[in-house]
Amino acid sequence: MKFKDNIEAVASLQPDFLGFIFYDKSARNFDSIIPDIPTSIKKVGVFVDETLETVKEKIEKYNLQAVQLHGQESPEFCAAIDHVEVIKVFSIKDEFNFEVLQPYEAVCDYFLFDTKGKLPGGNGFTFNWNVLKNYPSTKPYFLSGGIGLYEIEKIKEFKESPASNYCYAIDVNSKFEIEPGLKNIEKLKKFITQLSFRT
């Protein structure tokens, strides 16, 4: 019940996207019921090298509006997912070969840049955002990886830089957790207020 209440509390903050992790090796693996949330919020299924059949099954079961692919999914795999938005994740540390994005341009709606670490997401560290100065695409992207309250000033600086021209969304997770999958609502409220997302 606590996760249901927590999902509803997060939804009350009106994020644009709300993610649910479907990866059995993750402590955040979701295997419950999604409560009714506003239709303005896109429900996102997060997958790591899952079968296409399973991804489509979860899309239908949970009425997902988007999928976030954290593994080695091919462009062909992305192209086979229809009727929902596709967010393809790429991991960065201090450098990145942007040429790898090109095959995904036509088959993804967004890219997401996360921190390269031991786990496919949820590592709690930021990467060098200066790398994105060389972003060659016009496709909107999500900025992710270890973002919390201490990164607010850094985000504000980033938003003023050319590197952020196509930054569409800020993706947050582990830095706002009480425990895996359970969010600290007061911290999220503070984050949203201090970044003035809706002014």
Image (spheres, rainbow, N blue to C red):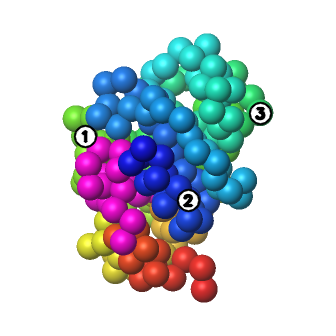
Quadrant in which residue 158 is drawn: bottom left
Quadrant in which residue 131 is drawn: bottom left
Give the labeled residue for mark 2: 11
194 shown above or below 64? below
Extent of the magenta region:
171-186
Name the element at disc 2: helix
Specify the farthest residue to the bottom. Answer: 199
The answer to whether residue 130 is seen in the rendering is: no
Q: Amino acid at mark 1?
A: Gly
* Residue 115 located left or right of residue 76: left
Name the mark nearer the viewer: 2 or 1: 2
* Residue 108 located left or right of residue 46: right
Q: Amino acid at mark 3?
A: His
Query: Considering only order in the chain, which callout, 3 or 2, is on the residue closer to the N terminus?
Result: 2
Residue 81: mark? none
Residue 83: mark? 3
Q: Position of residue 173 (x, y in %)?
A: 37, 53
Q: Quadrant of the C terminus?
A: bottom right
Name the element at disc 1: loop
Q: Residue at x 58, y 54 (%)?
A: 17
40 shown above or below 108? below
Give the labeled residue for mark 1: 117
Q: Position of residue 68 (x, y in %)?
A: 53, 38
Specify the farthest residue to the right. Answer: 83
Specify the farthest residue to the front. Answer: 1
